[in-house]
Image: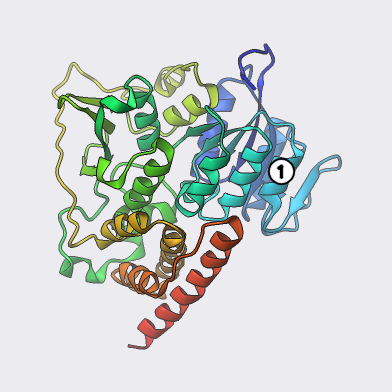
Amino acid sequence: MDLFDTPESIRVAILGSTGSIGTQALEVVRAYPERFEVVALAAGSDRASLLAQAAEFGVKMLGIVNGPLDAPDGTTVFEGVDSAERVVQESDAHLVLNAVVGSAGLKATMATILAGKTLALANKESLVAGGELVMSKTFQGQLRPVDSEHSSLWQLLEELPPDRVRRVLLTGSGGPFRGRTTDDLREVTVAKAINHPVWSMGPKISVDSSTLMNKGLEVIEAHYLFGLTYDEIHVVIHPQGMVHGMVEAMDGSVFAHAAPPDMRLPIQLAMAYPDRLGAPSDREGKPGGRIDWNTPQSMTFEPPDLETFRCLTLAFEAGRKGGTYPAVLNAANETAVEAFLGERLDYLGIPHVVEAVLERHEACEPTLEAVLGQDAWARAEASAVINARSLV
């Protein structure tokens, strides 16, 4: 359905509504109540925030993974691991924003696509784990990327024919440990790893950014989203976080997308496309929300340190192998990061665990059942590697 063929507001379901992306999406809705109507919300375990959001936006359909949820009378509540998927299937949303963290978002993504609803995708693991499945079922224009890097490439590639593109460049800030050596990283704490220098994100994504695994997952995602080979996708470290993606044409010209590091920009574009809504800083009356071209600006670019930050290399290797390797990469990483955040694994143990699990994996055809099965296998294997490492 073309959301702008009708004068009525766009009905939106937000999955992962209490997280960073979800709460910023609600800020967009709050700023444009005439454009968007929230009809369903789903969260993991933050019951208090979910109920507060439902009360503010008048939402009568909720999902919660870790229930029970004592909701007001007249509210439909789905509980358990399939709650987000049920919200997608049962709501009358035009557009689903999937901001669930981790591979748990894959089933909700598939439910959205199969229901014929427009998908604003912030759950990169859906494509990392099930990219072949997702893209084979997606019709033209149904999927809109929310990650700032993929949103930038989406906008750039819209204007440049595929046969004119030599490669794309995904930018990343380099995280809090840019320039550090492996020895420097031996004593990294959780507090240091989640202290991102540019973006305000949840703990899991912040750790992934610090290891460069987040950039590796984005490489795999870009492969599926834009039909690019892995040789056509490059990573560039850009500490200032103003250029979010670049496309190099066959003649060597490079087209860049620059914007302030504000996630509400790609969120609102995905929700309102093809319209462009006002800048968040303008509607808030806050200074500094736009790039100030009247003052000197410094933008630097450098190659990533693949020797120190091995997760990026592992992601490229898993992506090139294909099949269920990306799903195993993602599951092993999620398990390792969870252990690190719980102080059961040292920081340098994260790439060690991921590599060990990948080495034990035997690929198979990536059906939904196989992807979910290999996801479970990889988590069990990763846990075994973590337990063995803790005994050393």
Three-letter amino acid code at the position of disc 1? Val
Residue 33 picture quarter: top right
Residue 197: x %, y % from top left: 28, 46
Can residue 259 be seen in this snapshot?
no
Vertically, is 380 above or below 329?
A: below
Residue 264: x %, y % from top left: 45, 30
In the foreground, 28 or 150: 150
Vertically, is 144 above or below 193?
A: above
Looking at the rendered image, the quarter that the C terminus falls into is bottom left
Residue 210: x %, y % from top left: 30, 55
Q: Residue at x 52, y 64 (%)?
A: 375
In the foreground, 52 or 164: 164
In the foreground, 135 or 295: 135
Looking at the rendered image, the quarter that the N terminus falls into is top right
Residue 271: x %, y % from top left: 54, 27
Residue 254 picture quarter: top left
Left/right placement of residue 337 relative to residue 303 reads right
Q: Which type of secondary structure does the marked residue at label 1 adopt?
A: helix
Q: Residue at x 40, y 75 (%)?
A: 360
Left/right placement of residue 311 relative to residue 293 reads right
Left/right placement of residue 365 relative to residue 297 reads right
Left/right placement of residue 49 relative to residue 232 reads right
Determine crowd level at label 1: few under 14, some 14-19, many 20+ residues with C-alpha closer than 10 A. many
View extreme (right): residue: 73
Q: Residue at x 49, y 43 (%)?
A: 20
Vertically, is 274 above or below 97?
A: above
Q: For mark 1, what is the residue?
A: 87
